[in-house]
Each structure stands twice: as C-alpha cells, then as structure tokens.
Image (cartoon, grey):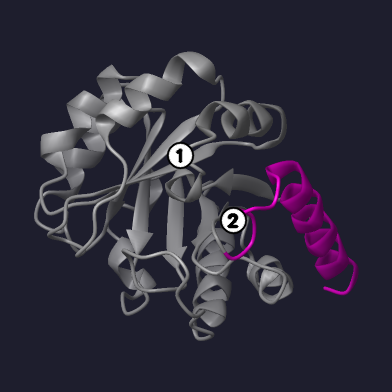
C-alpha cells in the first residue's frame, strides 16, 4: 500500500528550521504549509513570506492549505513565490469555485479541496473532475493537537469509493491526528497522503531523525496488520 508523507511545517521547530528542513528534503514527499488569517479560524500560522524564505532551500513540492476568508487575495502571491499546490476549503469557495480552480490550474499549479469534518463529500460533485487532491480534515481546522474524530474514517472510505467509481485521479489526503493510533484505519479506508504534525512526527526535545524512524516503523506495523 503506497502512501505519501507531508510534514506540516506549522509544527516545525522554528529554532531549527534549517536543520529540520534539510532532513525533510531527504525523506519527505512534500511539504504542507498552513496559512491562517485569524478570521476563518481563530489562529495565525505561516505566511507567503515564509514560503519565499524556504523555497531556495528545498526541491520538495510545497502544498499550501489556505484557512482564510478571502483566498483570492493570497493565490497570486503564493504562486509567485513558488507554491506548487493550493488547497481551499469547499465552504469558502462555493460561490466562485470554478473561477478559482480555473485560475490556479491556468497558472500551472495543482488544486486541492479541503473538507471540514461536518462537510459532506457531495459538495465536490460539480467540480470533482477538475481537482488534484481532496483533504479530509479529521479534526476541526485551525489548531494542532486536537482529538481525532472517528467518523471521518467512514468519510474517507466513501470518498475512495466515489473516486474508484468515477475513475478520478485525485489524491486522498488526511489532515489531523495522523499517528500510530490511526494509521491503520486511515490507510485501510483509502488515505494516500498523511499530513504529519505534532501527534505523529514533531516532538519537542526529540531529534526529527528519531521521530521520523518511529513514525515509519509505526506505519509499517499498521500496514502489516491492515
């Protein structure tokens, strides 16, 4: 069972960015960057300028998760600094989904749609054929370290069935509480990209190389028993 690892840079040790980014360059599949505006979610995270600063030091694809009220205000700036993929919340873009998807695709970038825990997969129906990735939030958006919502396993399974039946090519990504307690269920249900944050990878005071090894061992163990 193939899976991709996308470390969440919101959880990186800001005192060791260079060291940890160098390690991730050799091990991760992509980099996940959360951008929050303090309005859509009551928190602030990373920024366009953060991407501008790290871009010269990584060849990994940079995937931005926009948790903002007005995503169109960010998109062109994100593209200009080298963002490879932009993921948008379905609820926010409902009145202009085709326009924003077309804009990002016309710039040669990939488009993702993010589904909050209470958002049905049916919201994807009008434009499901146009997207590259669907992110299933297994926690409410905005804060690291929240408790896993178990009902999301069935949602991932249903999304995977929809993908297979429609012969779609989008990746199914999981955001929230990806750790040794959930790997088996998430991967068995159809998850393909695991966003790794504070519960599964980044641990205060423990070298990233050590937590990465533990993460890989936990995933392999879960696959052996899937």
Residue 221 among those drawn in magenta: yes
Identify the magenta region.
199-226
Looking at the image, which residue is at 30% across and 49% down? 45
Q: Main secondary structure of the magenta part?
A: helix
Residue that badge 2 annotates: 204
The circle drawn on residue 14 is 1
- What is the secondary structure assignment of the residue under circle 2? loop
Viewer-proximal residue among 155 and 28 = 28
Q: Position of residue 210 (x, y in %)?
A: 78, 48
Q: Position of residue 100 (x, y in %)?
A: 18, 40
* Disc 2 + disc 1, Cβ < 8 Å: no
- The quarter of the rendered structure image containing the C terminus is bottom right
Name the residue furthest right: 224
Q: Position of residue 94 (x, y in %)?
A: 15, 59
Viewer-proximal residue among 126 and 181 = 181
Evaluate whether residue 108 shows in this view: no
Looking at the image, which residue is at 43% across and 20% down? 55
Is 188 placed above or below 81 here? Answer: below
Looking at the image, which residue is at 10% across and 47% down? 70
Residue 173 among those drawn in magenta: no
The circle drawn on residue 78 is none
């Amino acid at each position: 069972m193939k899976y991709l690892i996308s470390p969440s840079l919101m959880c990186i040790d800001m005192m060791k960015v260079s060291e940890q980014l160098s390690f991730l360059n050799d091990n991760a599949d992509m980099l996940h960057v959360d951008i929050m505006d303090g309005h859509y979610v009551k928190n602030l995270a990373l920024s366009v300028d953060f991407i501008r600063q790290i871009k010269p030091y990584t060849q990994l694809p940079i995937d931005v998760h926009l948790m903002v009220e007005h995503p169109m205000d960010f998109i062109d700036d994100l593209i200009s600094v080298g963002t490879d993929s932009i993921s948008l919340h379905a609820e926010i873009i409902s009145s202009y989904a085709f326009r924003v998807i077309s804009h990002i695709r016309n710039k040669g970038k990939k488009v993702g749609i993010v589904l909050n825990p209470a958002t049905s997969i049916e919201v994807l129906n009008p434009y499901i054929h146009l997207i590259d990735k669907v992110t299933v939030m297994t926690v409410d958006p905005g804060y690291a370290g929240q408790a896993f919502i178990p009902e999301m396993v069935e949602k991932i399974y249903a999304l995977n069935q929809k993908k297979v039946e429609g012969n779609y090519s989008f990746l199914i990504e999981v955001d929230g509480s990806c750790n040794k307690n959930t790997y088996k269920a998430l991967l068995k249900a159809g998850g393909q990209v695991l966003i790794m944050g504070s519960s599964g990878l980044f641990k205060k005071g423990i070298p990233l190389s050590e937590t990465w090894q533990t993460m890989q061992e936990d995933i392999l163990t879960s696959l052996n028993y899937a």
